[in-house]
């Protein structure tokens, strides 16, 4: 059965009627700009063709009924019981409705049926894809006039407050605002965006996305610890955020310990790399982007210390088998890498990484070739 047909069928089983619409939102790959978003910095993601899809419609009782078609699980709760602190997949749906109600928007009982092919825990923003698909559904279903970036901000708040994950705005902005064939350069302070042409195929390139099958969790302490360290460093340096550091050497000399210096060096240099990537892409010089990916990975590995052995081996193997550039993508401690390569090389590189993993006993990875896709919208 076609996934959309399956979704409609599940909806009919729950609601005894057809859904009023079907909405989607994609996962994303961050080309460059890691852990810069919560430092008021710059990021350059693009949306994936893999997406979360939600069928939705009004109800005539007081319930929010949420069903995960991929898990065959249903969660029901009264609309009045929406409150932070819930766990599990349903929190990402309920959180969006909660934040809209908190902001004063009229939310009514509804049935929501979810499916997604964005890999979970892989650093491809599976949670943001769910949130942004629900956001798109809610805005149409309840007649809410909310600008795209404000939708992203509200979805981020749902994840921060309702779910309890201290993520920045990158994931939700990419899932909502991206356009096919383009990356999205985002200033995370001003929320100004620039569409960045990425004519990969036209210039003979492709991007491999490989899931190392090393799950990670942003809700656990490592992500939050790094964010807190950045905030302490900004306070010591007397700046609003690390984005405002202009003289890195002077700033590092003022910091009290080597750990904090490494964290700050990554954020400041990563912002510089992201801005450099924007300039190159605007000039159509995609061939000059891969070295920035390599520098970014080294910085995440050595200064921010967010890579793990599976990720490092995948990057090293990709480069050894023809990739022009490779880096971890996402929040870290597992998840995916991206490898920038010539067209037709992705399958060869993915197979080489699989063989390398097999030799050392790591779990078999999975991979696909990424194509920059559109952000959230309505399917029917």
Image (cartoon, rainbow, N blue to C red):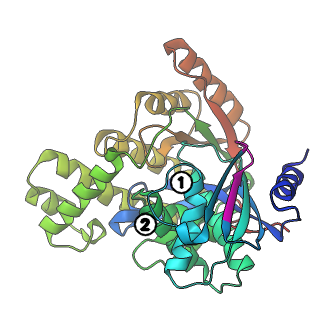
Determine the residue positioned at 59% across, 54% down.
Answer: 90
Dividing the picture into quarters, in which one does residue 239 lie?
A: bottom left
User: Do we see residue 115 in this rendering?
Assistant: yes
Give the magenta part as a residue range. Answer: 64-72
Residue 272's spot in the image, x, y percent? Answer: 37, 62
Q: Position of residue 154 (x, y in %)?
A: 52, 73
Q: Residue furthest front?
A: 61
Q: Relative to 141, is 274 above or below?
A: above
For the residues labelled 2 and 1, the Cα–Cα distance comes to 12 Å
Spot occupied by residue 249 in the image (x, y as percentages of width and height): 17, 58
Q: Residue at x 53, y 85 (%)?
A: 104
**Vertical position of residue 81 compared to residue 115: above or below:** below
Badge number at residue 42: 2
Quadrant showing the N terminus: top right
For the image, the number of numbered tags is: 2
Provide residue 111's location: percent of width, then percent of height. 73, 64
Asked whether 284 falls inside the magenta stretch, the response is no
> Residue 240's image quarter?
bottom left
Crowd rating for badge 1 (residues with CA inside 10 Å; few <14, some 14–19, many 20+) = many
Q: Which residue bears the numbered disc 1?
A: 31
For the residues labelled 2 and 1, say whether their Cβ atoms are less than 8 Å apart: no
**In this view of the protein, which residue sits in the foreground, 122 or 204?**
122
Helix, strand or loop under label 1: strand
Of helix, strand and loop, which one carries label 2? Answer: strand
Viewport quadrant of the C terminus? bottom right
Residue 275, visible in the rendered structure: no
Crowding at dot 2, Cα within 10 Å, few <14 / some 14-19 / many 20+, comes out as many
In front here: 125 or 191? Answer: 125
| Residue 260 vertical placement versus 216 (above, below) | below
Please give the label number shown on residue 193.
Answer: none
Residue 244 as seen in the image, left or right of residue 85:
left
């Amino acid at each position: 059965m076609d996934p959309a047909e399956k979704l409609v069928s599940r909806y009919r089983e729950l609601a005894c009627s057809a859904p009023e619409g079907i909405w989607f939102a994609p996962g994303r790959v961050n080309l460059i700009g890691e852990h810069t978003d919560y430092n008021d910095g710059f990021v350059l993601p693009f949306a994936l063709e893999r997406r979360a899809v939600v069928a939705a419609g009004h109800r005539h009782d007081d319930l929010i009924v949420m069903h995960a078609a991929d898990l065959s699980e249903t969660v029901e709760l009264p609309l009045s019981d929406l409150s932070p602190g819930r766990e599990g997949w349903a929190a990402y749906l309920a959180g969006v409705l909660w934040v809209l109600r908190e902001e004063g928007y009229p939310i009514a009982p509804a049935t929501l049926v979810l499916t997604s092919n964005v890999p979970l825990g892989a650093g491809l923003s599976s949670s943001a894809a769910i949130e942004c698909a629900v956001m798109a559904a809610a805005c149409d279903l309840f007649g809410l006039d909310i600008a795209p970036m404000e939708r992203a901000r509200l979805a981020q708040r749902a994840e921060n407050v309702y779910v309890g994950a201290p993520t920045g705005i990158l994931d939700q902005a990419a899932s909502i605002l991206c356009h096919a064939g383009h990356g999205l350069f985002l200033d995370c302070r001003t929320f100004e965006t620039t569409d960045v042409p990425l004519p990969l195929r036209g210039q003979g390139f492709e991007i491999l996305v490989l899931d190392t099958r090393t799950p990670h969790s942003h809700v656990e302490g490592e992500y939050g610890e790094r964010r807190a360290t950045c905030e302490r460093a900004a306070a010591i340096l007397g700046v609003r955020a690390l984005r405002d550091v202009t003289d890195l050497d002077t700033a590092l000399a003022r910091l009290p310990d080597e750990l904090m210096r490494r964290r700050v060096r990554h954020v400041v240099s990563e912002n510089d790399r992201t801005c450099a990537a924007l300039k190159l892409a605007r000039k159509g010089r995609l061939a000059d982007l891969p070295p920035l990916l390599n520098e970014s990975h080294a910085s995440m590995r050595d200064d921010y210390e967010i890579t793990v052995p599976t990720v490092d081996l995948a990057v090293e193997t990709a480069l050894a088998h023809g990739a022009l550039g490779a880096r971890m993508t996402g929040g870290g401690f597992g998840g995916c890498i991206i490898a920038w390569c010539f067209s037709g090389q992705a399958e060869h590189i993915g197979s080489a990484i699989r063989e390398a993993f097999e030799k050392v006993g790591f779990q078999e990875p999975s991979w696909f070739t990424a194509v920059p896709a559109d952000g959230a919208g309505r399917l029917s």
